[in-house]
Each structure stands twice: as structure tokens, then as C-alpha cells.
Image: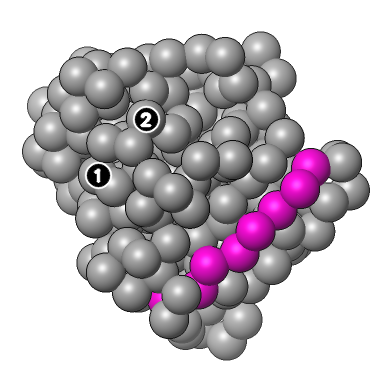
Amino acid sequence: MNFLLLGRGKTGSLVAEVAAERGHHLQIAGSKENAACAALTPDKLRAIDAVLDFTTPHCVLANIEACVRTGKNMVVGTTGWYGERHAELDRVRRLVEQHATGFVYAANFSIGVNLFFDAARAAAAALRHGYSGQIFERHHVHKKDAPSGTALALRRVVHEASGEKENLEITSFREGEVVGLHELLLESGADRIYLCHDAKSRRGFAEGAVRAAEWLAGKKGFYDFRDIWREL
């Protein structure tokens, strides 16, 4: 497949590496090459099967609109662009449906994190039995959004599974070169339930994104990675 990768950051570099290992052809456009979406014109996207976005929250919406209007499938690994209320997601969903393209986004493309979400979903029942809960997340000092998209997704998973009205407090730390560590703490007077996912590298995110782009081939529609990862 022919992919266009938007973004030359650390995760983007691993996406390029994984795509090459899996036999795909890849073009890369950084912020200079894609100023004002210059790399996303119909002519430049003609031979591209899917666009993978690992850029920044402030430019991803323009990238999405340009790709979708050109009829190209897209995988978005950038986080922090749709906010906690998901207003932007609804607008993007309508665009994807209007232009009959394929679109996959995620708070986190790691298979391990999505398994962690499943464990948290099961543990959320504790909140109906007198437990209190907290979420802690740690990332490198360069991460621009806080709380992380993964922490917000984790809170949403717990909230939906427990049926409780109060959202859990999220505490964020930005230190050193921490790739990503997320903790769910559920505590009662009798005991403590502790769930943790600690990313050792960004490779899990990159592999998930490339495999999502492969899965999207020939498909149309708006998908959250957490709903499709079992099919990869």
C-alpha cells in the first residue's frame, strides 16, 4: 500500500519504520511540506491509499478536512484535538459519512492499552460497591496535551462501565522522557485495586496505527480503534 505520513516526530518515525517492515511504500510530509495542507491536494494524494496523521492538535482538523474532501482514507494518531466533549468528533463523523471515506482514530493505538481498557471496564464495578477512584498519568515533558487522550479515554471507559455520575479525578505529570504510564486506582477501607499500563516504547502505537490503515483498505465509515483492534 502507498501511505502518506504527516509528522516527523518520534512516533511518526516509528510509523515509517513499521510501515517499511510490513512492505508498504511511504511518503513523509513534515510541517514545512504540509503548510496550509500543501501536501494534501488531490494531485498529490492521487496515488495514496491512506494518510496517517501524527502531527499536533492545532493542525489536525485542517488535515482531516483536506483528506476527507479528497476522498482519502485516514488514520489519526494525534491526540488532544477533539476535546473531552467530543464536539469535533461529531463534525468529522459527518464529513466522513458525507464523502464516503474511511476514518480510524484513537486515544491510543497500542493493543496493550486497549487490553488495559478492558481490564478497567471490568474493575469499574468497584465504584458501585463503595470504592473511590483516581487516575494518574505520566508522560514526557514535550507532550502538549494534559490530561492525555488515553487518560480521558480511560475515565470515559470507567464512567460508562460503572454507571456512576461523578467522573474520576485525573492527575497528570510531565517529566523526563516517560513514554506513557497510566494508572487506575480503586480504593475502599478494606483493600486497593491497582491497574497500570506502562509503555516501554512508542512502537506499540506505531504498529497499531499501521495495522489500522491496512484494516481500513476497501472500507468506508468512521471507526474508533478500540472497537476494531480485535479484528486486526
Check disc 1 and report the residue beneath it.
65
Which residue appears at 46% of the width and 75% of the height? 33
- Look at the image and tell me in which quarter the C terminus lies: top right
Residues shaded magenta:
24-31
Q: Which amino acid type is marked by label 1?
A: Glu
Check disc 2 and report the residue beneath it.
71
On whether residue 28 falls in the magenta region, the answer is yes
Give the main secondary structure of the magenta stretch: strand
Image colouring: one colour
User: Which one is nearer the viewer's eye here, 6 or 99?
Assistant: 99
Q: Which amino acid type is marked by label 2?
A: Gly
Q: Is residue 231 visible?
A: yes
What distance separates the C-alpha of mark 2 from that of mark 1?
Answer: 10 Å
Q: Quadrant of residue 50?
A: top right
Picture coordinates of residue 118 (x, y %)? Answer: 54, 23
Which residue appears at 10% of the width and 38% of the height? 87
Q: Quadrant of residue 39?
A: bottom left
52 left or right of 198 in image: left
Residue positioned most to the front: 43
Picture coordinates of residue 30 (x, y %)? Answer: 50, 73
SS for dot 1: helix
- Look at the image and tell me in which quarter the N terminus lies: top right
Picture coordinates of residue 19 (x, y %)? Answer: 77, 48
